[in-house]
Amino acid sequence: MDQENKLQFLLEMIRCSGDISYWIYDSEGELLHSQSVNEDFHLIFQRAGCLQYAMGQVGNAPMCLGENLGLLWGAVFTGEEETRQLHVIGPVQNTEISQRALDSVARSMIHTSERRRLFTELLTNLPVIPLPLFQHYILMLYFCLTGERLRISDVQYQRYTQSGIKPREKLTRDRHQNYMAEKRLLYHIREGDLNFKPAQEYAASLSSGIRVHSDDPLKQVLITTASFTSLCTRAAIEGGLPPDTAYTVGDTYIQAMIDCKSPAELGALTHAMYEDFVRRVHKVRTNHKLSPQILACCEYVQLHMEDELSISILAKQAGYTPYYLSRKFKAEVGESIADYIDIVRIERAKMLLETTNQPISEIARTLHYCSSTYFSDTFKRITGKLPREYRQEAGNR
């Protein structure tokens, strides 16, 4: 099989993961060829400084570009000097990017509101491909173009001293907010609460990590992620995960972090570690005597407590009639569906009262209570305290 056929075969294979564009630039950075889903991707690639960075590199090592935006491109050079060409695949999302981050990228590049909206939708629909898998795509592209086999450690990563879009501006540090965000993250592990993504996004918007004096950004991120892994390990033990299991999992992730080659790879691994601990604790805390249908209903409530919930919605999920589900749920769980929904929502309210400054009225609306008074009455019935009393006591602890 010749090079052209190899390349087309590879592109078809990686597009099984989603619509991934491919294009070629000449030695001056002019576009020669494009198989792009949308021409705006060239604009992102250029304004992010990725094209300028790649063109300034010496040698033909494969590159991973754009991680400061939460987007990734793979780039490979072929040829020498005046004849060399830059082959690019991407962009993809490394992990799901928050709406706030997408809006920030769109505002930095697009000036009209309507086009910005369409641009944000375009970014939202990008395929999500974990960094380790995307690294292999880059190495396979390199092999197709050069016939040479390399290792992941040979992939170069873009540094961000270039002109173009800069990494997200660091927000002013508020130690109390950081502490509350950390409590919120660890709460989800201790409770095995699967609805953890909003807490992750909120924490990411507050802090870039532990403040250390180092010229090595990878070392800074490693210190932060290793410290956070230790906190997650202890939270998992408090949530019921056996200490031997928790420490083994934590140590395994820390060793994998030491072997990471870029901040983006460390970030992806940290997300995986956090979710792993949440799901392990969730599994330990799950009542294994529940039938699969009732267990599915419980998990649905936990994942949708900020949405409208009713017996009819849960019955549809379980494939039962509302009457039969009500009887079966009460028999297995020991609570009525309505009471169980209140218990789960009040647990979430306790976490929000402890770890955020949200007004009580806003928490009530978020959890679908029709009024602050009804929310307060329900909260006191379950906890013995009013929400303001609970928040005050939590602040004094």
Image: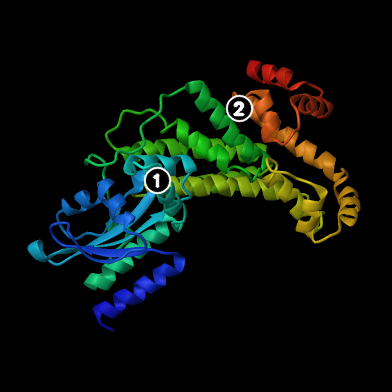
Q: Is residue 134 left or right of residue 87?
A: right
Which percent across, then down, holds residue 307?
Answer: 69, 43
| Between 5 and 280, the one nearer to me in the picture | 5
Q: Which mark is residue 328?
A: none
Q: Front-most of 389 and 115? A: 115
Mark pair 2, 1: CA separation:
34 Å
Tag 2 residue: 355
- Disc 1 crowd, CA 10 A, few/some/many (<14, 14-19, 20+): some
Look at the image and tell me in which quarter the C terminus lies.
top right
Q: Amino acid at mark 2?
A: Thr
Amino acid residing under circle 1? Arg
Looking at the rendered structure, which numbered label has been put on residue 116? Answer: 1
Q: Which color scheme is applied?
A: rainbow
Q: How many marks?
A: 2
Residue positioned most to the left: 82
- Asked if one can make out residue 259 in the rendered structure from this viewpoint, the answer is no
**Towards the viewer: 92 or 125:** 125
Measuring from the top left, give residue 189's x and y in whole percent: 62, 40
